[in-house]
Amino acid sequence: LVVACKQKETTTKEKQTIQKEQDKSSAIDDSKIGRKNYVVIWKWTTSDIQLIEDNLIKISDEVNTIWKDDIITDAYYNSESKIDKLAYFPNISFVIRAKSSQEAEKELNKLTLVEKGIASYTLYPIGTKWLNRDSDKINKAGITSSYAAVWTTKELGKASDDLIKSQGDAILKLWNEGKIENVYFDIEGTQKLNDITDFVFFINTNIEEEAKAICNALPFAEEDIASFKLYSVGVFWLGDGNEY
């Protein structure tokens, strides 16, 4: 009887533990519902090399942690920046997932990069992930570094359904050729004018002129529906195969 009671007690504890884990998992899943994507572009705000060296391991660990926690994805590092170069330190850019820009800023502001005034960031809302990174296509095309093309829609109301379709088809063709990857596109923003009309994709090339040519050839650029800015982001670092 005593043995049976102990077995029953153990079974009850196991059930409670399982339930707690399920509740925890459910809470995590609930916190992910309704998240949006924002691309984060960083810029050095210090010239104190020793300050960065003293915190470099911690900074790397923090980025890896928030990637493992599914807070960020599609991280790139650039060791050869020509615009914002500081010693041998790589520039980092990534996509952060949050329910609002305020929530994204709250998460980013906890990082050592921000707390110690090492770097500042700019957030760009980029909608929903449409096309992921296809390693096979990219390897076949030839591995290169990347440029982030950050688009701002100017005259969305002038975009006809045919033009929108042409834009989508052109982007899909570039992706199939391995020329672009990690495409984020605001589907709602192509149907009606709203506050979230930006989209982003990453161009695989070592040459900025080629990246510009790819963007300028897109229907939205040709018809002056949207403008773009290019950021050299270097080499793909962290990501996943999930669609968000």
Image (spheres, helix red, strand yellow):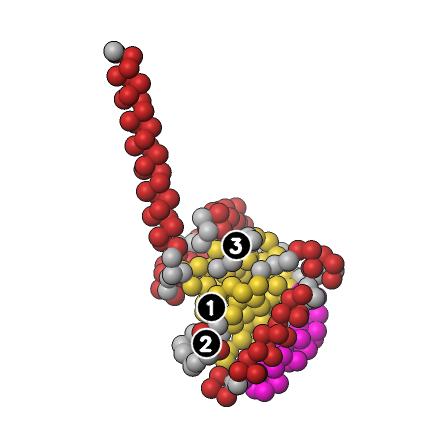
| Cα gap from disc 3 to disc 2, whole angstroms | 22 Å
* Residue 162 to residue 57: above or below: below
Mark linked to residue 189? 2
Residue 84 visible in the picture:
no
- Which secondary structure lies at badge 1? strand
Asked if disc 3 and disc 2 are in contact, CB closer than 8 Å, the reply is no
Residue 97 visible in the picture:
yes
Q: Residues within 10 Å of mark 1 (few under 14, many from 20)?
A: many
Q: At which x and y percent is residue 162?
A: 57, 83
> Which amino acid type is marked by label 1?
Gly
Of mark 1 and mark 3, the one earlier in the sequence is: 1
| Cα gap from disc 1 to disc 3, whole angstroms | 15 Å
- Which secondary structure lies at badge 2? helix
Asked if disc 1 and disc 2 are in contact, CB closer than 8 Å, the reply is yes
Q: Residues within 10 Å of mark 2 (few under 14, many from 20)?
A: some
Q: Disc 3 marks which residue?
A: 242
| Cα gap from disc 1 to disc 2, whole angstroms | 9 Å
- The number of discs equals 3
> Which amino acid type is marked by label 2?
Gly
Q: Is residue 207 magenta?
A: yes
Q: Disc 1 marks which residue?
A: 127
Q: Which residues are magenta?
A: 203-226
User: Residue, x 38% and y 65% (percent of image)?
Assistant: 101
Image quadrant where one finds the N terminus: top left
User: Residue, x 64% and y 58% (percent of image)?
Assistant: 134
For this view, does 224 lie left or right of residue 213? Answer: left
User: Residue, x 58% and y 71% (percent of image)?
Assistant: 149
Q: At which x and y percent is residue 156?
A: 48, 83
